[in-house]
Image (spheres, grey):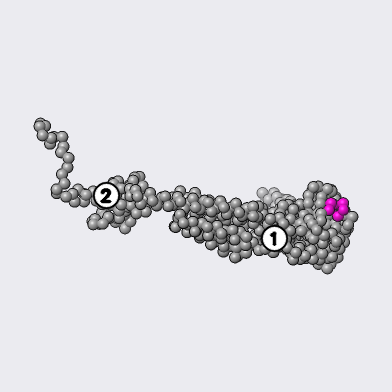
Amino acid sequence: MPGSAGVTAARSRAVLALVCLIAGIALLASSGATAQPGNRTVAVTDVRGAITPVTADHLADTIEGAERDGHEAVVVVLDTPGGLVASTRQIVQTFLDAPVPVIVYVAPSGADAGSAGTFMTLSGHVAAMAPATTIGAATPVDAEGQEAGDKIVENLASFAEAIAEERGRDIDFAIASVREGRSITANTALERGVIDLIAPSIETLLDEVDGTEVEVRDTSMVLQTADALVVDVEMTGPRRLLQLLADPNLAFIFLSLGTLAILYEIANPGLGLGGVVGVVCIILAMFALSVLPVNWAGAALMIVAAVMFIAELFVPGVGVGAAGGTAALVLGGLFLFQAQSGASVSMWVLIPTAVVTFGLTIFAGVMVARTRKMRSSGGSDDMLGRLGKVEGVAEGHPRAKVGGTYWRIRPADDQQPLRDGDEVRVVERRNLDLFVASTSTDETSRPNNVTTEPRPTDVEGSP
């Protein structure tokens, strides 16, 4: 009926209008809610373990994302024994020039802002610590754990002093933490003005810093963090892997193991396991070196070491290649990373690795020498004398199935060209090629003066 159809259409339009009205009200309510102080957000990220280039990149991306997403501040929860000098400087520069307030929070209880962590804490717009935490011991050390040279120490002391001056923190402690390796507790740090407050949790920290005025790029800002929503910012999966691998000692070990594995693959080809392990180790080493401050002179020495080790296989027994490769390996490990970066290979890793590599290279050379002697003295091959049928001549790729496997075949010297269907006998093997002779040629080419053994019926006296 026309009348009922019109009523139905009118009802549909009314329902649609009501849905649109409700959606519009919800949209306005949601947009108004984001502007309320109770819905402010703070980005929180954890930094634990050694400070590496991966850490520096993660913090830079976190701060950039916080500005983009409109977070009130970034809270860096810190617990570190130290790390690379170059990465520490990069992080400090990121904090000092951050477009949003950075709150460095040494936590949980028992955590330490050691060495690099001291510089990071001093450079935050707000510095806080949990109870029973420590900060300090920022004296740079070398690969053996000994104090670095005076020039490096004085340079870092001046760096710490400049940070403390910029943030209005205790300058004497900043200098003493580098020159004297001084370390203090959270309570002492608060008394001396090294930090701004002690807080047992992030929630308490955000409530206590609410209303604090900070300078962000020469602009005064008042923190509004009370009851702010905490947004966790975690390191990505690839970065977590890089953080795990970004260790100078691991990079050196992976390079050495990769070289050894490839060496044994060359010494005993065919299995493939050594090649696979070697390639995997080299890839992991490249992964680690991609985020570490590599000195290309050291990298060149590592390549020279690999070449010398491989050369030992071609001139085994002399030991010159192994000795030269070991010397290049040690020097490469010493110079593999830039000295001023703080990254280096520990001597406790370098020397044992070099000794083991030398010994295993000599062993591989001995294996190769024995294999060559066995091949030259034996002169036998289990493929010799086996039969097969020729295939693939018409396609230009002659082959024969011998011993259950298809082999490339070629006619032996003084043999006629191969033909599909001919039965052939293997007379020589050269690597993966079999040289064959036709079995019919074998019979027809038998000399006339050669006799065969008499058959039983030919024996004298037999019927």
How many numbered marks appear? 2
Residue 69, x across and y down, in percent: 75, 59
> Would residue 184 be visible to someone looking at this image?
yes
Q: Name the residue under label 1.
A: 342
Q: Residue at x 51, y 53 (%)?
A: 361
Q: Name the residue under label 2.
A: 424
Q: Dividing the image into 4 quarters, which one contains the C terminus? A: top left
Instruction: Classify residue 39 by image quadrant.
Output: bottom right
Quick one: 260 or 194, which is closer to the camera?
A: 260
Nearer to us of marks 2 and 1 is 1
The stretch of residues the image draws in magenta is: 184-189
Q: Evaluate if marks 2 and 1 touch, with contact meaning CB atoms under 8 Å apart.
A: no
Q: Which residue is drawn at 68% across and 57% down?
A: 143
Q: Is residue 187 magenta?
A: yes
Q: Which of marks 2 and 1 is nearer the N terminus?
A: 1
Q: Which residue is drawn at 21% across and 51% down?
A: 441
**Taking 224 as reference, is 156 left or right?**
left
| Amino acid type for the residue under numbered disc 2 | Val
Q: What element carries label 2?
A: strand
| Residue 10: image tag | none
The 10 Å Cα crowd at callout 1, few under 14, some 14 to 19, many 20 or more, is: some
